[in-house]
Image (cartoon, rainbow, N blue to C red):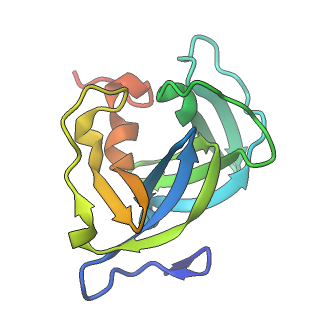
Amino acid sequence: MTILGKNTENTASGAREYLTFRLGKEEYGIEILKVQEIRGYEQPTRIANAPEFIKGVVNLRGTIVPIVDMRVKFNCSEVEYNSFTVVIILNLHKRVVGIVVDSVSDVMELAPESIRPAPDIESSIDSACILGLGSVGERMLILLDIEKLMSNVDMGLVAPAE
């Protein structure tokens, strides 16, 4: 399978490919296999009483896609919509969701030995949603389990279990 000109099959060494993006000064990575497409930001249709970080919904070729601004969700100090602002459309287990990020960097292949466990600290991200910290040269990536993050009850995208 090829996305963004990259081969997305896992290599024999166990390395995985991650799409990297920026939120404020931090760089994050999500598994490329979860990414359906990358689009420029367009103002979504607002949904009444939705949490502030859910910007609304867009109609993507007949599919209604909720748009989550990760900058608002992660309490970034500046949330600016400009020509670099993009929406990453994710194809998760049971639904399609868009996430707004400051910019997309590139696709990186990370071997398991270059990923370290994340420290257990209090943050706006549930620590169960962080796969680890990937290091590539001087760059440090926060690797997210985007499927787990998007299915968290506090995201408001799924009904709580009864």
Q: Nearer the viewer, residue 48 or 81?
A: 81
In which quadrant will I find the C terminus? top left
The residue positioned 49% from the left and 81% from the top of the image is 1
Q: Position of residue 137 (x, y in %)?
A: 41, 68
Residue that lies at the very extreme toward the front in this rendered image: 138
Residue that lies at the very extreme toward the top in this rendered image: 49
Can residue 98 be seen at all in this image of the molecule? no
Residue that lies at the very extreme toward the right in this rendered image: 83
Classify 36 as above or below 62: below
Residue 140 lies in quadrant: bottom left
Residue 149 lies in quadrant: top left
Q: Nearer the viewer, residue 14 or 54?
A: 14
Can residue 140 be seen at all in this image of the molecule? yes
Q: Position of residue 108 (x, y in %)?
A: 46, 71
Q: Position of residue 33 (x, y in %)?
A: 43, 67
| Residue 43 in the figure: left or right of residue 16 | right
The residue positioned 81% from the left and 47% from the top of the image is 83
The residue positioned 77% from the left and 33% from the top of the image is 43
| Residue 107 in the figure: left or right of residue 143 | right
The residue positioned 33% from the left and 60% from the top of the image is 134
| Residue 134 in the figure: left or right of residue 27 | left
